[in-house]
Amino acid sequence: MSLAQKTAFQLLELYRNKKASEEEALTDVVSAVHTKDRDTRSIHAYIDLEHSTPLQKQVSGPLAGIPIALKDNICVEGREATCASEILKGFVSPYSATVVEKLLNAGAVIFGRTNMDEFAFGSSCETSCYGPTRNPRDPERVPGGSSGGSAACVADDTAIASLGSDTGGSIRQPAAFCGVVGMKPTYGRVSRYGLIAFASSLDQIGPITKDVRDNALLLSVIAGHDSKDSTSANVSVPDYLKALEDTKLSGMKIGYPLEIQKDLTPDAAKLMTEAVKILEKKGAVIDRSITLPHTKYAVNVYYIVAPSEASSNLARFDGVRFGHRAAATANLLSMYENTRGHGFGAEAKRRIILGTYSLSSGYYDAYYVKAMKVRTLIKNDFDEAFKKVDAILMPTAPSAAFKLGEKTKDPLEMYLSDIYTISANLAGIPAISIPGALSEGGLPLGLQFLAKPFAEETLYKIAHSYEEALK
């Protein structure tokens, strides 16, 4: 097994025992990238490596010498950050995101920019201006999105771990499709300073790793209050690794919502049946009576709230201050029109138009305000459920990874890929996706656990226990 195939903890152990060096590990990872990820015909998890010298601030700390890849919407000082969009090509960030500073202070090696759906608009990593990323488990299939590159590089052993962002499932769904672990922390648990915004009330940075233990380690480094982010929560960060010490789930109550039990695909139904058996064997009590009645509206609510916020956030990209500017325009208005017309892709335009319409005079109350009221009802559903259970179990996605191009002609069908993940973002609660089983076609299927706000340690305990049961 090459060093690139190791987990972070395995590498740290090798470093301590002088059986491998940080330089050897980085060389192995770089070699793996150049062998497996050379161009758009390969997995294409990365956007830029040739012009991106690995960054390391110090050589000590809990992540010393661990190569970590970053999604292309997380800013690094002096490096290009484009959100996989033509409109931001050439934009070089003047500062680093808080999560980047925390990684560097922990000794991590910042390594490479990963591909993504343009401005995180997508569920398949096919809307990138650089071309699609492929699934390492089956290159004819999508890796999921929008953090498709961040999940694919970890699954393909071209990074030890990565960071992505999750607005409606963009960490968890690709983690499920690629067979890795993805955590969406509680809204406010991790600073969003330096994350180029999609939907400000929904976005959250989180780790993607090869196993649960690495995930807990990464979150322990990047979590915490940040005065530079007004939405950052001033809540203490527990010892996530300590939560992994006891793999028994005796007395723990896990809810399996009535709404989720209906209309499952055969693969998802099999996955849930096996998951319930494993959890009960571990000592957990499964409550099949809990209900989340308003989550059936989650997709509808999300595709009003998220595009509305995106419309506002993306208004700044007009050719004046950032990135691409259309040449030879007659006046300022035509410069705006030409820049945005050329710079944004079809899905970005679709969401900007939808969001602008929802916020417009005469429709704001009918759409946006009503959606926010239903969002509150969805949050209330979870609050009531967590009075009865410690966590909630559901599939991460309705199916395994679909084929490239299979859903690009029908945006509504694509949006339903996130049907099980969106509600956690609307409610602001943490959720983790872990590999659960294989589909009939031999592809990874993910299951997710959700918990009350700031109870990530509960999720790590359950996920680690489940992971151990599968070994």
Image: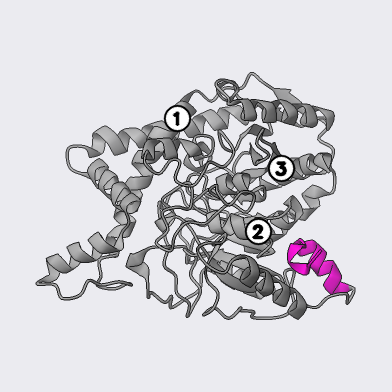
The extreme left residue here reads: 330
Q: Earlier in the sequence, mark 3 or mark 2?
A: 2
Secondary structure state at the residue bearing disc 1:
helix
Answer above or below: position of 122 versus 255: below
Question: Marks 1 and 2: CB-CB under 8 Å?
Answer: no
Q: As rendered, which of 268 and 422 lies closer to the eye?
A: 268
Q: Amino acid at mark 3?
A: Thr
Q: Amino acid at mark 2?
A: Val
Q: Earlier in the sequence, mark 3 or mark 1?
A: 1
Q: Quadrant of the C terminus?
A: top right
Secondary structure state at the residue bearing disc 2:
helix
Viewer-side label of 3, 2: 2
Question: Marks 3 and 1: CB-CB under 8 Å?
Answer: no
Secondary structure state at the residue bearing disc 3:
helix
Question: Marks 3 and 2: CB-CB under 8 Å?
Answer: no
Instruction: From the image, give the main secondary structure of the stretch colored magenta.
Output: helix
Q: To which residue does mark 3 refer? A: 458
Question: Magenta residues?
Answer: 1-16
Q: To which residue does mark 1 refer? A: 377
Q: To which residue does mark 2 refer? A: 154
Is residue 334 in sight in this rendering? yes
